[in-house]
């Protein structure tokens, strides 16, 4: 069950709108979140890896002072733990890794694409090339899993989060982000009962969920 909070950060002009319901990455997002066995094949993983490898050189052009507003609001109002291990899943080139590092937890930056990770700030967070469908962490070992414009593998995320762990879901352009799910979709995708807070903020949307 998600409680939707009032917006407190207005949207500045100039919101990037790259995504839609028809975007190929949206289709992958929805398929992966459904947990269907056929959604994440070796071929699909290789295709996605190559897609982002090719974007790595220009990913910095997406940097913008407004990009972190949903994440900032999530930290201010979502009750994200500031202790323990914070796993940034699909961290890309680390555009928002400094915003995570600044909040005090020990951040690990994990991504499928080596080319994206090459640009990430290693001095702030160790970088790990891995597939979020098979996280190389023990059960119940991660305090916060932060997914910013990243695919949700529900069972695997559930497996690694501590009993009181938090899943932080951010779409920096809301439903105009290619990789997007609503807060209620995230809630529905997760195994078992979860509870959470969500809001629109700046250009985007966020949700913070915990097991009920
Ligand atoms: C849309 S980008 C977002 C990057 C970063 N979070 C940001 O907002 O700038 C999605 C990232 O997820 C990574 N990714 C895709 N599938 C993944 C998987 N199965 N495991 C880990 N990372 C994955 C991609 O390589 C890419 O860097």
Image (cartoon, grey):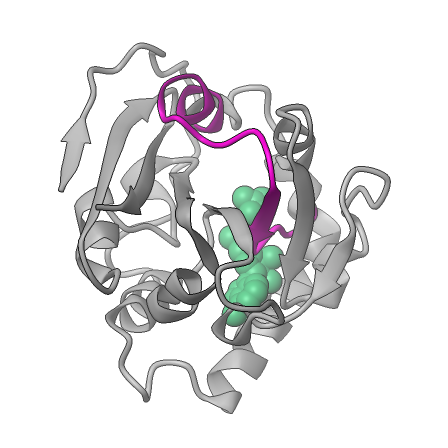
Q: Is residue 84 left or right of residue 15?
A: right
Q: Residue at x 31, y 44 (%)?
A: 210
Q: Residue at x 62, y 32 (%)?
A: 100
**Could you tell me which quadrant the N terminus lies in?**
top left
Say if the magenta span includes residue 75: yes
Q: Which residues are magenta?
A: 71-93
Q: Nearer the viewer, residue 200 or 125?
A: 125
The picture quadrant for ligand 1 comes to bottom right
Q: Nearer the viewer, residue 64 or 89?
A: 89
Is 34 drawn above or below residue 162 in the view shown?
Answer: below
Q: Is residue 85 left or right of residue 134?
A: right
Q: Residue at x 59, y 44 (%)?
A: 86
Kindly tell me whether residue 18 is visible in this rendering. no
Q: Is residue 143 left or right of residue 193?
A: right
Say if the magenta span includes residue 56: no
- Residue 98: x and y in percent read 69, 30
- Residue 21: x and y in percent read 24, 56
Q: Nearer the viewer, residue 55 or 109?
A: 109
Q: Residue at x 52, y 28 (%)?
A: 67
Is 186 drawn above or below residue 166 in the view shown?
Answer: below
- Residue 52: x and y in percent read 61, 63
Kindly tell me whether residue 31 is visible in this rendering. yes
Quadrant for residue 33, please give it: bottom left
Q: Nearer the viewer, residue 27 or 32?
A: 32
Outermost residue, right side? 123
Outermost residue, front side? 163
Is 130 drawn above or below residue 141 in the view shown?
Answer: below
- Residue 194: x and y in percent read 22, 49
């Amino acid at each position: 069950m998600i409680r939707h909070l009032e917006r407190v950060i207005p949207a500045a002009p100039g919101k990037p709108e790259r995504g839609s319901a028809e975007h190929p990455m949206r289709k992958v997002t929805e398929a992966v979140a459904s947990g269907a066995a056929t959604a994440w094949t070796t071929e699909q993983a290789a295709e996605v890896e190559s897609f982002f490898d090719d974007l790595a050189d220009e990913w910095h052009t997406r940097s913008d002072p407004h990009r972190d507003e949903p994440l900032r609001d999530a930290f201010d109002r979502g009750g994200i733990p500031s202790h323990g291990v914070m796993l940034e899943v699909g961290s890309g080139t680390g555009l928002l890794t400094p915003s995570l590092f600044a909040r005090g937890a020990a951040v690990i930056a994990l991504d499928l694409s080596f080319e994206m990770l090459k640009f990430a700030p290693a001095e702030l967070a160790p970088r790990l090339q891995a597939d979020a469908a098979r996280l190389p962490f023990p059960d119940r070992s991660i305090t916060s899993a932060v997914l910013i414009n990243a695919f949700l593998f529900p069972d695997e995320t559930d497996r690694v989060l501590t009993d009181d762990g938090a899943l932080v879901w951010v779409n920096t352009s809301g439903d105009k982000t290619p990789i997007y799910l609503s807060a209620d979709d995230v809630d529905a995708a997760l195994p078992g009962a979860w509870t959470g807070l969500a809001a629109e903020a700046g250009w985007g949307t966020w949700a913070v969920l915990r097991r009920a």
